[in-house]
Image (cartoon, rainbow, N blue to C red):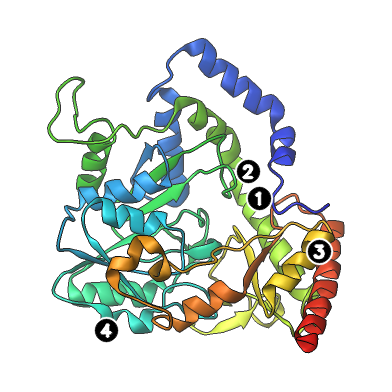
Amino acid sequence: MVPLCDLKRQYLDLKTEIDAAMQAVAAGTQYILGPNVKALEQEVAAWCGCRHAVGVGNGTDALHLVLRALGLGPGDEVITTPFTFVATTEAIGMVGAKPVFVDIDPRTYNIDPNQVEAAITPRTKVILPVHLYGQPCDMDAIMDIAARHGLLVVEDCAQALGAAYRGRQVGTFGVAGCLSFFPSKNLGCFGDGGMIVTNDAKVYERVEMLRRHGGRVKYHHEELGLNSRLDELQAAILRVKLPHLKKWNELRRQRAYAYNRLLADLPQVMRPNELTDRGATIPLGDEAKGAPRLAAVYHQYTVQVENRDAVMQSLQAQNVGHAIYYPVPLHLQKVHANLGLGPGSFECAEQAARRCLSLPMFPELTAEQQHATVSALRKACAAGVSQRRAG
């Protein structure tokens, strides 16, 4: 059996430190906004190279609170991608704003900057790129468009903590970056957790107030806020893990390069691409030709295959973990039916949703497990071809 993600191995590697950290929190009895939350905020801010960080309840709240802090509301529009998790547009809807979708670059799965400008209207306030699968968006192009049109940029970094664009951490280009610490993320806690990173003091102060019922002083409330505080126990766990994140991300890159080499002679599988600092794309694994300075962190290693259902059935039979992120693009979800966008509205996102398939990816993934995964995928693709011919 090759699991899609193995969280237990990471815990066992750090069990002594994690257990001690949890016991210290239990003994200290300061469970809400205690010293570990404050220390983690400082450590993550330093890790990302920004001035401020605010721990919140989850990644969705991070997005929601930033949009609240920026004053977005009914009538405002936010440009984003239809190929992402629904949390991105949930946050937009929760402030009463409208998501405006732009199709993806089929090579990177991220929002296509070349199509952003055409989507801007007088109501546009924010561009919200998602660094999907841990791969950085083309931030130079996005920031240039935002500057020319007087727009703000909020980065969804839920899958991308540690990813870099031209040597700079994602989440630090726009007015704020939003992180998730969901257990399976590159830096994951033992439940829900999130964080906002920013260099903007006003955004920091307002988000910090909003996360605790809209008040700076206990029992004195300036506006309606949320109860969205990162848990002290989760912060303690994350502080144990954070020093290992750089190593874990590098191991993910190595696993991605290994996959790329192993799949190089399998034409039925479309491998992911990575933007170079020149704005072009090169296949992963071609680092000998000049490694890209844009460092993806491979929260997922996602390929595209034809006849995906047959391929998945074969992988399942061979006990190889796999998943679809995401099977239905957001513009075709019932929750966004009011936008009136039907099939064919965003062809690249729709094709990716039909064909994408994520393979096992985690830092502790062994060479033997990768070889077993690729061997199973070869058999699965062959089975898919046979079924297509029979049909």
Q: Which residue is mark 2?
A: 244
Which SS class for mark 3?
helix
Q: Please state the horizontal and vertical placement of residue 343, each as a whole percent of the image.
A: 43, 79
Q: Please state the horizontal and vertical placement of residue 16, each as a whole percent of the image.
A: 70, 25
Can residue 149 be seen here? The reply is yes
Residue at the location (40% across, 58% down)?
156
Q: Which mark is residue 118?
A: 4
Earlier residue among tags 4 and 2:
4
Residue at the location (39% across, 48% down)?
60
Q: Are marks 2 and 1 in contact (CB under 8 Å)?
A: yes
Which SS class for mark 4?
helix
Amino acid on which disc 4 is placed: Ala
Q: Are marks 4 and 1 in contact (CB under 8 Å)?
A: no
Q: Which residue is mark 1?
A: 247
Q: Are marks 3 and 2 in contact (CB under 8 Å)?
A: no
Which SS class for mark 1?
helix
Q: Which residue is mark 3?
A: 373
Q: Vertical placement of 264 versus 187: above or below?
A: below
Amino acid on which disc 1 is placed: Lys
Distance from disc 3 to disc 2, alpha carbons, whole Å, reads: 26 Å
Would you call the spot at circle 2 few (<14 residues within 10 Å), some (14-19), or many (20 or more)? few
